[in-house]
Amino acid sequence: MTTHPEFPNLHVLDHPLIQHKLTHMRDKTTSTRTFRTLLREISLLMGYEITRNLPLETRRIDTPMVAMDAPVIQGKKVAIVPILRAGNGMADGLMELMPGARVGHIGLVRDPVTHTPSEYLVKLPEAGGRTFILVDPMLATGHSAVHAVDVLNRHGVTDDQILFEALVAAPEGMRTFNEKHPNVQVYVASLDERLDDHAYIVPGLGDAGDRLFGTK
Ligand code: URA
């Protein structure tokens, strides 16, 4: 895991398996089917790193041999919250990793001209101090990410309880995000070069939703 001098809350997950899978996802000849599988696999691997610091407590159990105080994850079950629709592909991998997790949804649609998001669906598990993992493959302009964290804040989830998982981020998006939410930890497989004139990430991987669902 590497950090970035400009963005202290950004963690780039440089595990070779994550980097290898990301390269296949970027390749424009990769099929929808393979893209979908890779997105699930990569977000599971990223989830393993992201959850590394979840606090533990001990629980008294009996093994067949003795009684012992054994570690379990402290507090309420983690919540996974995909930002629709591309976030769904990442949530699948995290749900495989944490089958007991609660799952919320935030539906945001991006205006093609202004690139600002508006919400059409918000359905979330009770906050109550649990960790929320917000997922969206592309942190591009940062507007959707800011908006989704604002939604969680209104729901009673504080920034320090939120982890943001994306595949690829653009520096412009990280700057916008950090103006509002510098205390949310952001985990990505790559910090790419820039945004193009249509707010797509370069080199990026194209439209993550279209590539995941086979739409145009
Ligand atoms: N959304 C995407 O799916 N891709 C980008 O490059 C930017 C936003």
Image (cartoon, helix red, strand yellow):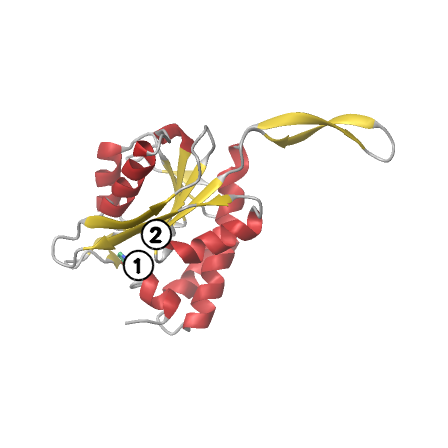
Q: Is mark 2 within 8 Å of ligand 1?
A: yes
Indicate which quadrant contains ligand 1. bottom left
Image-quadrant location for residue 63: top right
* Residue 143 place in picture, x, y as percent: 22, 45
Tell how many labels: 2
Q: Is mark 1 within 8 Å of ligand 1?
A: yes
* Residue 81 place in picture, x, y as percent: 41, 46
Nearest to N terminus: mark 2 or mark 1: 2
Q: Which residue is mark 1?
A: 204
Q: Could you classify mark 2 by the number of other residues whose Cα lies within 10 Å: few (under 14), some (14-19), or many (20 or more)?
A: many
Is 181 on the left or on the right of 62, as rendered? left
Residue at the (50%, 46%) spot, across then down: 47
Q: Badges 2 and 1: C-beta atoms under 8 Å apart?
A: yes
- Disc 2 marks a residue whose amino acid type is Val
Is 89 on the left or on the right of 174, as rendered? right
* Residue 41 place in picture, x, y as percent: 51, 57
Which disc number belongs to residue 168?
2
Is 65 on the left or on the right of 108, as rendered? right
